[in-house]
Amino acid sequence: GQQLNQSPQSMFIQEGEDVSMNCTSSSIFNTWLWYKQDPGEGPVLLIALYKAGELTSNGRLTAQFGITRKDSFLNISASIPSDVGIYFCAGQLYTSGTYKYIFGTGTRLKVLA
Amino acid sequence: ETGVTQTPRHLVMGMTNKKSLKCEQHLGHNAMYWYKQSAKKPLELMFVYNFKEQTENNSVPSRFSPECPNSSHLFLHLHTLQPEDSALYLCASSQDKARANEQFFGPGTRLTVL
């Protein structure tokens, strides 16, 4: 079945560093979403991407919808301690006559002050 | 209360117990969702309700039984669960199923099955 490969699985970075993570798949997606989940909370939508090649920013976060529609990346610039959490990608694709969302396994980010 | 709330936040139950999880959204949305989040696995969509009608059941075992009495409330009734059902159960809502891109999640119920 369809699946998203999200990498890295986890990362430790120093405060102030830039962070990059990505999701790849063998399937073509119509939409890419990036979420952040803080401990003890549900995921919160950060950025939604709807067109191949689209580059969208939300503060220090920038995400891109890959040209092939099979991948997406998320960058965080100048990380701060509150960036710690789990970042999930999700893609929407059309299969078997319906739209489905597939989630990645998450990238666990830890920021060292 | 604002957004999406879930109760209880934590639940420990034996395999022979019957319990229910509750989700309530205060956003005026018409679509509601149940997800299962297990460690190191992708979020798994379980059920979708759109205008109180179940529109998706992703091959979920019958020991999980959803109920949506109105657009603001969603329940997940649990009975004779297995230890592998231990997970974080997340509820979400969106304006309607067509706008599933814009889902708002609750904080989840951490379920432990002994």
Image: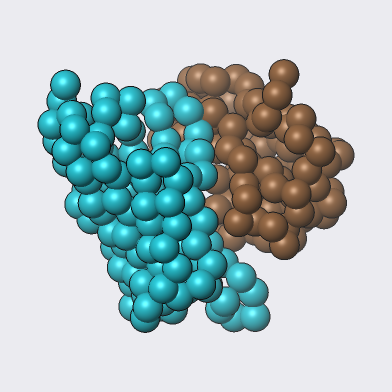
For chain A, the rendered hue is: cyan
Q: Vertical placement of B79 versus B63: above or below?
A: above
Q: Vertical placement of B85 versus A48: above or below?
A: above
Looking at the image, which is closer to me, A50 or B87? A50
**Residue, x 72% and y 19% (percent of image)?**
B1
Looking at the image, which is closer to me, B68 or B92? B92
Residue A31 location (% of width, % of height): 52, 67
- Residue B77 is drawn in which quadrant? top right
Q: Vertical placement of B2 versus A86: above or below?
A: above
- Residue A109 is drawn in which quadrant? top left
Q: Which chain is brown?
A: B
Q: Quadrant of the C terminus of chain B?
A: top left
Looking at the image, which is closer to me, A1 or A95? A95
Residue B106 location (% of width, % of height): 59, 32
Residue B82 location (% of width, % of height): 46, 38
**Residue, x 65% and y 56% (percent of image)?**
B100
Residue B70 relative to residue B106: left or right: right
**Residue, x 76% and y 54% (percent of image)?**
B96
**Residue, x 51% and y 44% (percent of image)?**
A45
Residue A26 location (% of width, % of height): 34, 78
Looking at the image, which is closer to me, A45 or A99? A45
Residue A23 relative to residue B27: left or right: left
The colour scheme used to paint the residues is by chain
Regarding residue B37, the answer to whether it shows in the image is no
Number of marks present in the image shown: 0
Regarding residue A45, the answer to whether it shows in the image is yes
